[in-house]
Amino acid sequence: MERDGERIEITISSRFENIELVQVIAEHLCENAGLDEDGSHWIGMAVREAVANAIKHGNKLDVRKKVSATFDLRGSELEIRIKDEGEGFDPAKVSDPLNPKNLMKTSGRGIFYMKTFMDHIEYSFDDGGGTMLLMTKNLAKGSGIATTKA
Amino acid sequence: MKATSRDVNGVEIIKLEGKITIGAGDSQLREVIGNAINAGKKNILLDMSGVTTIDSSGIGELVGSYTTVTNRGGKLKLLHLPAKLNELLHVTQLITVFEVYDSESDALGSF
């Protein structure tokens, strides 16, 4: 599990078909660091949701705008930064998908999944535009998600 | 995403295979359900066993499909949930919304 100074960076144009590239990098990095398949999958899922939001809500599907993803692994601490070129948003205004009045909404679960599968997430916003999402996970703790049999 | 449909005793069983993700299978799922409704199908059983990847957009389309079918007086139920999809429905409490079956005959008998 202990790996020092692993850094991977990738920049993609804002196309949905590029999401999987970033997701696969996240999953491989986690598996190479010793996390099991399920745990790696859930981190990949958080990354998928983050990149999808950056493309759709941040860059508003403008293919000229880029999304960058940076993975830093120090020991068992994984930091993931997803940055877009959008105008930002107010995280406080994101509705709770578990609220009964929101349960049947067709959107609004992406950030919830990120929070569920990662230890910590936080957004920051550049004055000149652009949103940066930082997500952290201690891989030594495992996924923390008990995949239940259907 | 690939969808294969068959009718069993008035229940439209739709087997979904592949990805139900943003920009890919999510809109296809909406189309598949829309086509079934337009063909007069009311009771729909989605066989999820072949779904390899689903994201929040795909989950959203499942919710939308459920609402669409229910609003037209029909029922939409799920069959053979992969473990990870089951988990995604659990953490969002949507598992309380959908009727889920492990056996096709049990599912058919429930309509």
Image (cartoon, helix red, strand yellow):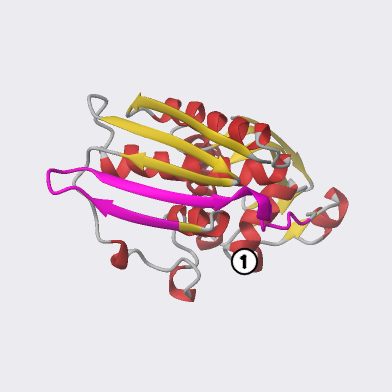
Residue position for label 1 = B97
- Describe residue B9's horizontal placement relative to residue B22 as left or right: right
Residue B11: in sight, yes or no? yes
Q: Is residue A144 magenta?
A: yes
Residue A104 placement (x, y as % from top left)? 49, 64
- Describe residue B73's horizontal placement relative to residue A34 as left or right: left
In-front residue for pair B92/A134? A134
Which of the 4 image quarters holds residue A93?
bottom left
- Describe residue A98's horizontal placement relative to residue A56 as left or right: right
Asked which secondary structure carries label 1, the reply is: loop
Please state which amino acid type lies under the numbered disc 1. Val
Q: Is residue B6 above or below residue B91?
A: above
In-front residue for pair A1/B68? A1
Residue A87 placement (x, y as % from top left)? 18, 46
Which residue is at 49% across, 26% downward? A21
Q: Is residue A5 above or below residue A93?
A: above
Q: Residues within 10 Å of mark 1 (few under 14, many from 20)?
A: few
Which residue is at 42% across, 55% downward? A107
Q: Is residue A38 above or below residue B28?
A: below
Q: Is residue A139 magenta?
A: yes
Residue lying at the far left of the rendered structure:
A128
Which of the 4 image quarters holds residue A14?
top left
Residue A78 placement (x, y as % from top left)? 53, 45
Residue B111 placement (x, y as % from top left)? 75, 60
Query: Which image quadrant: the N terminus of chain A?
Result: top right
What's drawn in magenta, residue-wise? A121-148
Residue B40: in sight, yes or no? no
Residue lying at the far bottom of the rendered structure:
A100
